[in-house]
């Protein structure tokens, strides 16, 4: 998603709830994660946004308004998702 939307100024931010910092860094390296990530072991952000399952994706516009929440894996290349992102 980051690669597809970067030119439009979209920033993808991954938030991990890993308590073990070493495991977090191993995961990033093993899976070649190349977008911004932070670790939130206390799950403060999950509480703030009402996260009920993982993964969850929040689309937040430039004004800080949450426009959509995806629960579970997402096919970022699907026509429905691409249409939604292009209209932001």
Image (cartoon, rainbow, N blue to C red):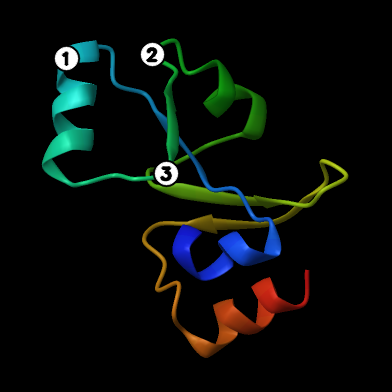
Q: Are marks 1 and 2 in contact (CB under 8 Å)?
A: no
Q: How many angstroms separate mark 1 from mark 2 (CA)?
A: 12 Å
Determine whether, in the image, residue 81 is placed left or right of residue 88: left
Q: Residue 12: percent from the left, percent from the top? A: 53, 48
In which quadrant of the rendered image does the C terminus lie?
A: bottom right
Q: Residue at x 24, y 12 (%)?
A: 21
Q: Identify the element where label 1 is drawn.
A: helix
| 42 horizontally vs 65: left or right | left
- Give the CA distance from mark 3 to mark 1: 18 Å
Choose the circle earlier in sequence order: 1 or 2.
1
Residue 85, how many percent across, how many down?
66, 72
Q: What residue sits 17% from the left and 46% below the top? A: 31
Residue ID for mark 1: 22
Q: Residue at left 39%, top 47%?
A: 55
Whether residue 68 is situated above or below residue 13 in the rendered picture: below
Front label number (3 vs 2): 3
Drawn side of residue 1 relative to residue 20, left or right: right
Q: Quadrant of residue 28?
A: top left
Evaluate whether residue 20 shows in this view. Answer: no
In the rendered structure, find residue 41 and report the number of the disc placed on it: 2
Q: Which residue is mark 3?
A: 35
Front-most of 60 and 2? 2
Identify the element where label 2 is drawn. Answer: loop
Query: Which is more N-terminal, label 2 or label 3?
Result: 3
Question: Circle 3 sits in a helix, a strand or a loop, which is it?
Answer: loop
What whole-number distance in Å separates the C-alpha atoms at marks 3 and 2? 19 Å
Q: In the rendered view, would you say 33 is above or below 71?
A: above
Residue 19, image x, y percentages: 28, 12
């Amino acid at each position: 998603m980051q690669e597809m939307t970067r030119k439009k100024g979209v920033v993808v931010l991954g938030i991990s709830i890993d308590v073990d910092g070493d495991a977090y860094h191993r995961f990033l390296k093993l899976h070649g994660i190349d977008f911004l990530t932070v670790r939130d072991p206390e799950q403060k952000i999950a509480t703030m946004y009402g996260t009920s399952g993982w993964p969850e994706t929040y689309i937040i516009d430039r004004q800080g308004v949450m426009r959509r929440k995806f629960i579970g894996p997402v096919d970022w290349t699907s026509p429905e998702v691409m249409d939604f992102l292009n209209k932001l």
